Image (tube, helix red, strand yellow):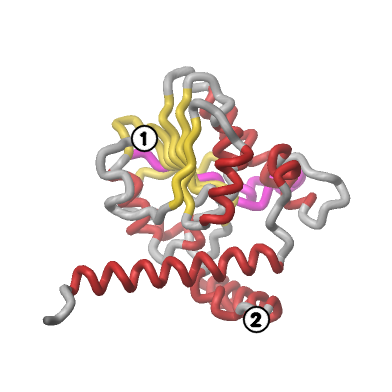
Amino acid sequence: MNQPVKDITKKRTQTARADFEDLYIAVRQQEKRVYTDDQLKNLPEIDSLHIYCDEWQIRKRSSERLIAYLQRKRRYLKILEVGCGNGWLSAKMAEIPNVEVTGLDINQVEINQALKVFKRDNIEFIYDTFNDSTFENETFDVIVFAASLQYFPSVINVLKQAQAILNIRGEIHIIDTPFYNPLESFEADQRSRKYYATLGFPEMADYYYHHSISEFWGFKYRILFNPDNLFNRLFKKGPFNWIAIRK
């Protein structure tokens, strides 16, 4: 008897997920981006001599902007972070009064670390992919993609999935994510392929996508932080756009 198509598709999806997960954590280890528990507790603060100190200064500023924005809402918020990694940002958002936070990631290693390091009554971490069935019976007021949108092949598809579980007046926030104009995209892809090949993991380039802000066409989006603003450029406030999308 032939195996049902649905079962075959599910197994292929699980295999692809496992392949990406193993590859991703191997790259993180090679890049020295796997942190100790003590380092994780303090992120985005990190030793000034750390290899990624400058990067964490950028992420500190962007996370502070996002958290201040959410605090000004002064109401109960149910927050989902898609691609939470080791959970540091989810944990920071959980410090906002009157919120519940869910961190979701496909990386079991970092999810396990998040579960161990961040123990709060108002936060949970889930090891799973983000798709139409992940949160069939749940909705959220805020969905955050922080340095994670580039791992999704289609901006349109993932934003539609997010909007489907967004409450009325809910918002999607995208931070710490590079965007390219169409002319830059090809060159950026070539740089990524060279970079991952140098690391010894050339196949990782097939999972890293170079998106454009033009892909947000058709969504109700606002740019809350523009790195090309003269003031932001002069004072080096950050290299990434902060984009908010309403349902």
Looking at the picture, which amino acid does disc 1 mark? Phe
Looking at the picture, which amino acid does disc 2 mark? Ala
> Is 131 above or below relative to 4?
above
Asked if the magenta segment contains residue 232, the reply would be yes
Crowd rating for badge 1 (residues with CA inside 10 Å; few <14, some 14–19, many 20+): many
Q: Are marks 1 and 2 in contact (CB under 8 Å)?
A: no
**For the N terminus, which image quadrant?**
bottom left
Horizontally, is 41 left or right of 161 in the view? right
Residues at marks 1 and 2, CA–CA distance in whole angstroms: 39 Å
Residue 113 in percent (x, y) is at 60, 47
Residue 224 in percent (x, y) is at 53, 39
Please give the count of numbered marks on the rendered protein: 2
Horizontally, is 5 left or right of 132 in the view? left
Name the residue rendered at 55%, 79% in the picture: 203
Q: Residue furthest front?
A: 1
Start-end of magenta stretch = 226-247
Closer to the chain start, of discs 1 and 2, is 1
Q: Which mark is residue 245?
A: none
Does residue 203 appear in this view? yes
**In this figure, which residue is indicated by the disc labeled 1?**
140
> Is 100 above or below relative to 12?
above
**In this figure, which residue is indicated by the disc labeled 2?**
197
